[in-house]
Image (cartoon, coloured by chain):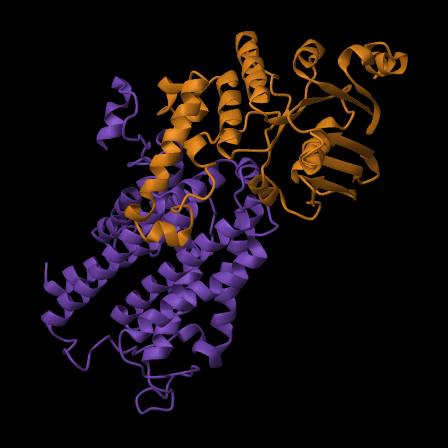
Amino acid sequence: MLAHPEVGVAADRPLLVADDIHRHFEGLHAVDGVSIEVPPGQITGLIGPNGAGKSTFLAVVAGTLPVTAGTIVFDGVDITPAPAYRRARRGLVRTFQLPSEFARLTVLENLLVAAPDNRGDSLVGALLGKRYWIEDERRYIKDARALLERFGMSAKESDYAGNMSGGQKRLIEIMRALMLKPRLLLLDEPMSGVHPKIVLEIQRYLQELRAEGLTILMVEHELHMVERLCDSVIVMAQGKVIGSGTMSSLRKQREIVDAYLVG
Amino acid sequence: MNSYYAANLLVYAGVDIIALLALNLQFGVSGIVNFSFIVFQAVGAYTAAVLSMPPDTTFGYEFQVYFGGYHLPFPIPWIGGAIAGGFLAIPVGLVVLRKLRSDYQAIALLVLSIITNEVITNARPFLNGAAGLALVPQPLSDVIDPNTETYQYFYVAITAVCVVLVFVVANRIVNSPYGRSLRAMREREIAAIAIGKNPVQLKMTVFIVGGVIAGLSGAILVGFIQLWAPSVWLYPETIILFAAIIVGGRGNNVGAILGALLVPVGFEEVTRFIPSSFGPPGLIPALQWVAIGLLIIGFLWFRPEGVRPEPRHVFEGAPVREDLEDARAS
């Protein structure tokens, strides 16, 4: 390690640094000065009572909502002014709390559409005709089918995504995000409204992805799930961070338990 | 059926098909409710007219006032009409498509259509106001005598070439990964952004492409009927085109062609045969509007996907399933 100090520095550098983030809605301070760091290769949990500002914070990080004040640095680059789609292209990919599949696209198309840099995914590329882009398309079909296989949804590839169950839609959304080869996955309550059987599946997939080195920041309500999945946890209440650490250490902190019970 | 009538029908069908392929790209595929579509056709027609007409001081043309009058040979007026349609889409798109929610986009575009028509109607020196432009020269009329049957079929042929060209363009867009991105944006814009799509860029592009095609359709039409006035591009014309898309099948290019043949062409042709002595004056045109309205409501209620629904994209090597056989065949 000493022989390559710069490697050590790069590996230890947080992938995401959010500094003093504020998000106000007409006087309501939904996010009120939140500063967090997300270390690479880990699953970081973001918990807190309803209305704590977790989802708003996640939306601000993803660029879905603009910041009122504060800076967001992703992999050493200040991305605060970047629009959401550009952050996604950089590898900062979010999912949504409510199902957000493309209903009238098939399951396979839902994945393919997320493929970055397909030569046919521009007006000129499209006009040049199939021969121009078919190679890219084939490659991405292969990638997408590998994901479908892994997530046990191969049989559904030609079904409309809108006809899938809540849990399957959640899986589609995670697979779709993975097509972008994200470096940081932002999950907004990935288990909400999902059948308990699929919850266990999702949990297993997330653990696998972590083992492969993917960094995840997830908002989640279910504390047992957070305890099992997350390396570290950040607790929010009323728009502020009130604590962070491992779940077991947090359980011992009186004010955090109170915030949950009272909030 | 004489040849003039047949040519007339075919050119109108071609123009409607071209227009509907454009509207299908915008509305059917991308979800842009372009209620000012007819304005883009009109700007193409006016542009083609002033490019092909001689100056308004020319003998025989003094009864009208208009700017331009460049007397340019075919195909420059048609190309100019198409470019004008595309150019108009830039400022309109930048104002309407960037910030407004889609329902407000529709309202803004509808209002734009009404205002534009009012302005052109009342600002006479610009494009001869309410009376409109007449005696627009027909393409290549100095080469082929326009009063012959040959010319009629020649016009049908050049219209057909444009139809094929536009159909190929529309198909390439719809069936490409780019078309898939447009459909994803239509389905759920916020999720499309989350996977790296820039919705403003996508919408602007498709708005401009649609504008170009709409402008071309106007240029073809004006070269054939030789006149263009505000009364032929009132905003309800757009509603007829929307009815055609809904009947034909949103998102399906073949559906757009079918819609063109069923609604603007078929409908007009069928109702022509109702004797005009039937009922009080103005009853038939009024009933036509009622029928268009009922057609839209009826289809949205009973068959919202239209006669030819958007095809399901099944990829080579997909697991074989019996319930999808029909989809693969289509």
Question: Looking at the image, is A182 positioned above or below residue B104?
Answer: above
Left or right: B170 in relation to A53: left
The front one of B120 and A260 is A260
- Residue B6 lies, in percent from the top left, at 15, 60
Q: Give x and y (percent) for residue B100.
A: 60, 49
Q: Is residue A237 above or below residue B160?
A: above
Q: Nearer the viewer, residue B79 or A37?
A: A37
Q: Which chain does purple denote in the image?
A: B
Q: Position of residue A128 (x, y in %)?
A: 32, 53
Q: Nearer the viewer, residue A142 or A213?
A: A213
Q: Is residue B106 left or right of residue A126?
A: right
Residue B114, can we see it? no
Label the orange chain with its letter.
Answer: A
Residue B313 figure quarter: top left
Question: Based on the displayed image, in which of its 4 quarters is residue B49 positioned?
Answer: bottom left
At horizontal 36% and vertical 59% (from top left) the residue drawn is B213
